[in-house]
Image (cartoon, helix red, strand yellow):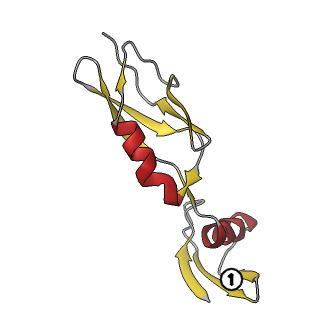
């Protein structure tokens, strides 16, 4: 199996070719070890940071994100959880809005006051 990827770890955006043969994954096109690690992870266990907004009790929105990556296949379920709550004000950057969503906390990325 062969897959082409663009590395997103740094601004270089290396064009990577990831090959899997008999359980062995090899990467070419990377200019640093981070690109190799990214490509192998993307092939075997893709993870994502989710960014979104949460409804606040005053009808406004607050921007949020996962504080660690979650499995890519859990993104839709994560969004359903995020969309099911209403946050209480005031909110400060870094406040945990929802605890332990697939091993990550949903945290505020902006301040909101009453």
38 on left or right of 60: right
Query: Residue 11 versus residue 103: which sits nearer the camera?
Result: 103
Mark 1 secondary-structure assignment: strand
76 on left or right of 25: left
Q: Is residue 44 above or below residue 19?
A: above
For image coordinates 62% across by 41% down, the residue present is 103
Please provide percent x and percent y for residue 36. Answer: 71, 71
Please provide percent x and percent y for residue 5. Answer: 54, 76
Please provide percent x and percent y for residue 13. Answer: 54, 69
For image coordinates 71% across by 66% down, the residue present is 37
Q: Which residue is mark 1?
A: 28
81 on left or right of 15: left
Quarter of the image for the C terminus: give it: top left
How many discs mark residues in the rendered view? 1
For image coordinates 52% across by 49% down, the residue present is 49
Spot the residue most to the left: 59
Q: Quadrant of residue 87?
A: top left
Q: Is residue 103 above or below residue 17?
A: above
89 on left or right of 68: left
Dot 1 alpha-carbon crowd within 10 angstroms: few under 14, some 14 to 19, many 20 or more? some
Q: Is residue 11 above or below residue 96?
A: below
Quarter of the image for the N terminus: give it: bottom right
For image coordinates 67% across by 75% down, the residue present is 30
Query: Residue 111 versus residue 71: which sits nearer the camera?
Result: 71
Spot the residue most to the top: 114
């Amino acid at each position: 199996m062969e897959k082409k990827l663009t590395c997103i770890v740094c601004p270089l955006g290396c064009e990577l070719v990831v090959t899997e043969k008999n359980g062995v994954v090899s990467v070419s096109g990377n200019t640093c070890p981070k690109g190799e690690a990214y490509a192998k992870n993307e092939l075997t266990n893709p993870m994502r940071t989710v960014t979104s907004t949460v409804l606040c009790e005053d009808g406004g929105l607050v921007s949020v994100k996962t504080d660690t990556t979650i499995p890519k296949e859990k993104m839709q379920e994560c969004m359903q959880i995020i969309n099911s709550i209403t946050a209480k004000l005031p909110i400060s950057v870094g406040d945990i809005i929802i605890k332990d969503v697939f091993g990550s906390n949903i945290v505020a990325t902006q301040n909101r006051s009453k």
